[in-house]
Amino acid sequence: MRLISASKLGTVCALLGMAASPTYATELGLASSPAPGTELFDGKVEIKGAIMSSFQELEADDNAFNVADRSTDSGFNRIRFSLGFDIQVSERINAFVELSEEPNDFGTDDQFEISNDLSFINYMLTDDLTFRLGGVVTAVRNFGGYSDGAVVQGNPLIGNSPADMVTAESGFTVLGSHDIGSGFLKRVNWDATVTVPTFFEDFGGDRGYDYFFKGSLDLPMGFSVGGGYAFNDLGDQVTGDNPRPFSEVQTMGMVQGDGDNYNFPGSGAGARDTHAGLVPGLEVDVWQIGAQYEGEDIPLYARIWFGRAEDKFSFGDSSGNQTVASQATQFLQQTSEMQFYGTEASYYIMPSKLYGAVRYTLVTNESDNAGPDDELTRTQVGGGYWLNDVALVKAEYVSQQEGANSPGQIGDDWDGFMLEASVVF
């Protein structure tokens, strides 16, 4: 299969000093891209890239929070591109740098700009153990295709899940991958991560750290299972002797996701408004379990996941009521809790050419005062056609249902169509 195949992922992981395992399919951007790359400086540097353009027609129903989201027009999204540099420093040290024009993350000022989207240094302590330092991926998910800016070919659909617990922050990760051999258990993969709660810099008092742990087991016949857990203690920014202004509080970014390529006029280019936005990530516990199947004899790829996030704080509106991130003006010392479930499958109708895909996600508000109508659901149906080994076109219909007390941030149901064309090199 083309979608996050183990063989293509192995090529990329070898460049990054990692074991080729589905555990690392949660890498963001070109760090997980199957782009072939071009070697420079006697093979010490390999450059690879991605370019993506898309078209959307999306509209929300009449009770959406922002009036502009209720009456929209179709149009083209800003083009995204990324350049990734794999750098072999020495036999045991390598590095990765990605420079991107990615409005999902760095587009709030509506200016075209190239940003350091993701970069890190790998120190291979042993053949099975790597220490990574820099901008590191933070996640509790082990499996799954994901669109990150221009790097979209690992995702069988166009949008992501509204409960994708993944982003990147500044810190370090220890990664391990251990071949077990033949039998029921083929490989064990794990990583442990410590970060500051931002991709940038913050040295203010009472800030705190985020902590992440996850692992997976590779089993025979294309099956894998895994789980992850994350927690932090950042609440002193709100309750300490010198509380920070609302806009300056740092939270665990993972619980807000890493950005969809869907865009509504009422949201900024770098907003996370199509993702579930109930839990702020101040004093949060998050766990997720999942499984995947990558067919060895049939062209089928499927996965399922389930998780829960609970925070001692909530987002609050100007009246002091619990709300979601897009409507928040303050934090409340009130517990917020959500549960999420998802399943996805893709199948090749024409081998190596044409495939269909479907994803369903359910997120519920489990807070004590949630009330009725507390579900957010997203259904995505689409597919893709490979023009050649590096060029892919995709189409998708998406429908998101947001109950009045759900974790949804648009405020009402919305749906529409998207088209996407991408190349890697």
Image (spheres, helix red, strand yellow):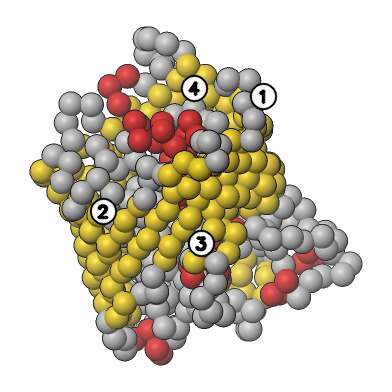
Kind of element beneath mark 2:
strand
Q: Nearer the viewer, mark 3 or mark 1?
A: 3
Residue 152: horizontal and vertical position, in percent? 36, 55
Q: Nearer the viewer, residue 344 or 78?
A: 78
| Marker count (numbered) | 4
Kind of element beneath mark 3:
strand
| Residue 376 visible in the displayed image | no
First in residue order: circle 3 vs circle 4: 3
Give the residue displayed 10% in from the left and 43% down from the top.
Answer: 350
Give the residue displayed 73% in from the left and 71% down from the top.
Answer: 248
First in residue order: circle 2 vs circle 1: 1
The answer to whether marks 4 and 2 mark residues whose Cβ atoms lie closer than 8 Å is: no
Residue under circle 4?
188
Residue under circle 3?
100
In the image, is 70 to the left or to the right of 233?
A: left
Q: Amino acid at mark 1?
A: Leu
| Residue 200 visible in the displayed image | yes
Q: Amino acid at mark 2?
A: Ala
Residue under circle 2?
391
Q: Nearer the viewer, mark 1 or mark 4?
A: 1
Mark-to-mark CA distance, 4 and 2 = 33 Å
Residue under circle 1?
125
10 Å crowding of disc 3: few (<14), some (14-19), many (20+):
many
Mark-to-mark CA distance, 3 and 1 = 30 Å
Q: Amino acid at mark 3?
A: Ser
First in residue order: circle 2 vs circle 3: 3
Residue 61: horizontal and vertical position, in percent? 31, 82
